[in-house]
Image (spheres, rainbow, N blue to C red):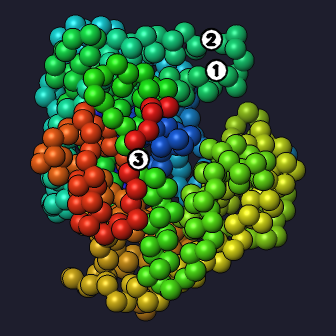
Amino acid sequence: MTAHIINTFRSTEKVKLFIDTLLQDYNQPTYQAFLHILDGTMHSYLQKEEGWVPLPSTLIRKHWKRAKVDLEGLLNAGLIEVKVIGEIEVAEGVILTQTYSRKDNKCTEYRVCPEILDIISTQSPKTISDYKNAKYYNLMKGTAMNVVQRYRKVDENKHSFPKLVLDAMSIIETCTVNQVALEKYMGKLEADLDPDFGADNLQKARKLYAIAKYCYTNIMNNIKEELTDGLITYNVVFKDPQDSGRLTERGGMQGCPREMKKVGFSNIPNIRNYDLKSSQVYGLIQWFEYAGISTKWLENYLSQDKQVYADRVGISKDRWKECFMALVMAARITKQTSSTRFESQKVIRKGKEVEVGPTEAIITALLEEANGDIDLAIEFYIKFYNEVDELKINIDDWQDWLIKTHVPLVSICPGGKQIIYNRAGGTFDLSSYKNEKGEWTTLNKLKSRLSAFLLQGGEAAYIHHLTWVSQHYGYKVISNQHDGLVTIGVIPQEAMDYASRESGLKYAQLEEKEFC
């Protein structure tokens, strides 16, 4: 997907006045660049990342032409910070920080400083009445924006999104939440922003508060109706669909913290939370069968509680799942490892987080689990490798089969491009991974992204078909959760069977779960 500068940043008048004052000494391009970084910081946090927003100089020149974008001024004023990826000694005793690398194809990344995020959050309205009576603006253009577009039907190039995805977005119009409970939850998070709790705890509290506040603000900015018992409905607003066909809500109840989800969906009559059980594993089993690869390891895995595997490695169940999913998406692991790989992945220097070399999700996760103890993280890594070495061989064989056998059979070449479709109707451009001679380049990245595209596409197709058929089976879908749905009313088996047939996800198992 081509990178672009956002064209919409919706806010209340009070937030607008604060940001106008904050940036009064800067020109319009710098003002817009700050908003772009602010928007990207929040979306990065929602993806459980660290808030960094890539902003290549080529994109700056393309969007703002010859106008000066004063990022250095924003940095010096403490409004944004830059990601340091290394240090270079240019002379004896003279060390320069490195923020980009042409060699490793890494551009400079920025994020809004946590203290500034805190202040912006405090400018939001406090009560339902305040939100309903607020005036809204698109800060990127400085124009009134009291009505927000729920979703777009075409992308930046005027190409229509897949019909199945559009149908699903059209069905999910409003979401019901417990506003009173959410307001109390937000008050608790705000109270936790206490410097006396220590720097590490304050950093975690700030990030949690920023994510929750972003989600809560998007709910309150789009109130549709006040119901009884503290309940409200809000208009669900979607970002452009992902290439895989996945839907992403702008804030709201999809990407919010777990506890917020539990609180927000509390005390709502006949609410149901559905989840696709082990969707990626079942999807992988189906693909292995297509490719003639053994499914024995995966079948054994499904027959046991994941805690068994986590205990053998010595990590938490959630961390095991994180590492396992990274493996499924083609994370590179080898039998041999060293402290150098871990040291280069995450180094703390002069209070700044420094990352060197390729990002390796499993190493990062295990370092976090070990609280930065490299020796312990290596111990986790070796045990994890021993648990999954057989599966890794299977995954490597499957991804080779995808490239050598599946792609030539199913890809098409309209307009000189080679593309492949998934079950949700999403398209994957294979041409961007080939050189002028037609040879594959960055093969590992291709395998990883193609795997995710196909696995997530099947999952998304199943969820979208369940959403579309809801109008015929008497349940109302109020929230898309990527691999699940929140509904008012029970999803009958007939609807599940329909979604399984239409998506081709033959092993799909939808289960009802508590919010947690």
Judge depth for marks 2 and 3 and give the one in front.
3
User: Mark 3 highlights which residue?
Assistant: 511
Cα separation between marks 1 and 3? 37 Å
Verify CB contact (< 8 Å) between mark 1 and mark 2. Answer: yes
Q: Toward the viewer: 151 or 235? A: 235
Percent of width and height locating residue 57 = 44, 53
Percent of width and height locating residue 415 = 21, 82
User: Mark 2 highlights which residue?
Assistant: 194
Percent of width and height locating residue 307 = 68, 47
Cα separation between marks 1 and 2? 7 Å
Verify CB contact (< 8 Å) between mark 1 and mark 3. Answer: no
Q: Residue at x 58, y 68 (%)?
A: 298
Judge depth for marks 1 and 3 and give the one in front.
3
Q: Amino acid at mark 3?
A: Glu
Callout 1: few (<14), some (14-19), or many (20+) C-alpha neighbours within 10 Å? some
User: Mark 1 highlights which residue?
Assistant: 202
